[in-house]
Amino acid sequence: MQLIDGKATATLIKQRLADEIKQLTQKYESEIGLAVIMVGDNPASQIYVANKIKSCEEVGIHSELFHLSDSIAEEELLDIIDGLNRRDDIHGILVQLPLPRQCDPARVIEAIAPEKDVDGFSYGQMGRLVAGKESLVPCTPRGVMALLEHYGIQPAGKHAVVIGRSNIVGKPMAHLLLQANATVTVCHSRTADLAQFTRMADILVVAIGKADFITGDMVKEGAVVIDVGMNRLEGRLTGDVDFASVSPKCSYITPVPGGVGPMTIAMLMSNTVEAYLAQQRG
Ligand code: NAP
């Protein structure tokens, strides 16, 4: 069994990005700008946002944090996004979810100019992904693909099973694996006899949000197991995969923490560079 080291891979990707950003900002004589909008004081959001801002500093992206009151009216939030859409020095806009009840996340995400939607959550970017066109791909599934590539794991011809069908992880994950020529099965909470499918997986991607849900008896010998889950159990972070029983059966497995998580932020940096480049080229 080989451990997939997401932390080391993310560090390498960010180092390469830092070099690329230096060259690009000299070439185009302008900084790369990312606006991060956080509404309210959700503790998990605060940690994610702080890590995103820190990564921007590491790679040389100019970031601006808009920390807004959780009583903000939806229209006011939409006005702020509209202002950022019009700014030439802001190339990416990210709205940290969840939002307070009065703000409809779909409406807010759709207000971001598609070319600045570095999370890739808008219907425009999702549609492009499904159609197989170049797009800003949601960071977590993009991070999973980057890990597979980094470790020389070829999805082509393999049976990939994705558990979870959310718009931000499961669905884009399935499409990326399909584009990489895997045969893809998507499972969810209404799948009957889930283990029947997980046992068929050459590549198993788990994005459910239930601690230690996948156990050794559900996994085929030699499988590649990617654990996207991030669950807080008694103060510690744990994945959706029961690492102790699953890891002895795997050829490769991601740990939690230190697997997919760090890749998500590295991919956000990469998406912001892609958005900048596309905007420079017009
Ligand atoms: P989500 O929106 O809650 O979706 C969870 C998915 O899992 C749903 O499609 C649900 O099915 C399915 N599911 C729930 N219980 C199931 C069961 N018993 N059997 C089979 N499928 C089941 O969650 P998400 O946003 O996709 O996130 C999933 C996990 O990834 C969470 O732990 C989250 O914290 C983590 N995550 C990590 C990162 C990272 O950077 N590492 C980024 C994003 C998310 P239905 O559709 O039928 O309800």
Image (cartoon, rainbow, N blue to C red):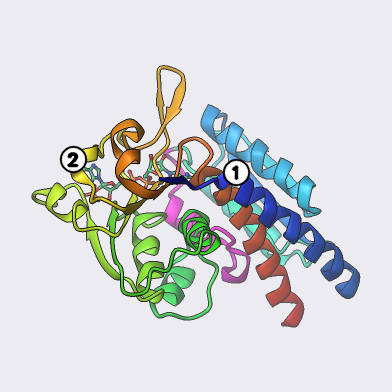
* Proximity of marks 1 and 2: CB atoms separated by less than 8 Å: no
As rendered, which of 8 and 53 lies closer to the eye?
A: 8
| Residue ID for mark 1 | 7
To which quarter of the image does residue 116 belong? bottom right
Q: Earlier in the sequence, mark 1 or mark 2?
A: 1
Which region shows up in magenta? Answer: 101-121
Relative to 232, residue 22 above or below? below
As rendered, which of 164 and 117 lies closer to the eye?
A: 164
Q: Which residue: 67% across, 62% down?
A: 272
The furthest residue to the left: 192
Q: CA distance from mark 1 to mark 2?
A: 28 Å
The reply, left or right, for residue 225 in relation to residue 52 is left
Q: Quadrant of ligand 1?
A: top left
User: How many residues crowd around disc 2 within 10 Å: few (fewer than 14), some, or many (20 or more)?
Assistant: few
Label 2 is placed on what type of residue?
Asp
**x, y percentage for residue 89?**
80, 63
To which quarter of the image does residue 242 belong? top left
The furthest residue to the top: 234
**x, y percentage for residue 20?**
78, 66
Q: Which residue: 79% across, 46% down?
A: 57
As rendered, which of 53 and 58 lies closer to the eye?
A: 58
Q: Which residue: 43% across, 80% down?
A: 132
| Residue ID for mark 2 | 217
The image quadrant where one finds the N terminus is top left
As rendered, which of 89 and 191 lies closer to the eye?
A: 191
Membership of 107 in magenta stretch: yes
- On the question of residue 199 being in view, the answer is yes
Which secondary structure, mark 2? helix
Which secondary structure, mark 1? helix
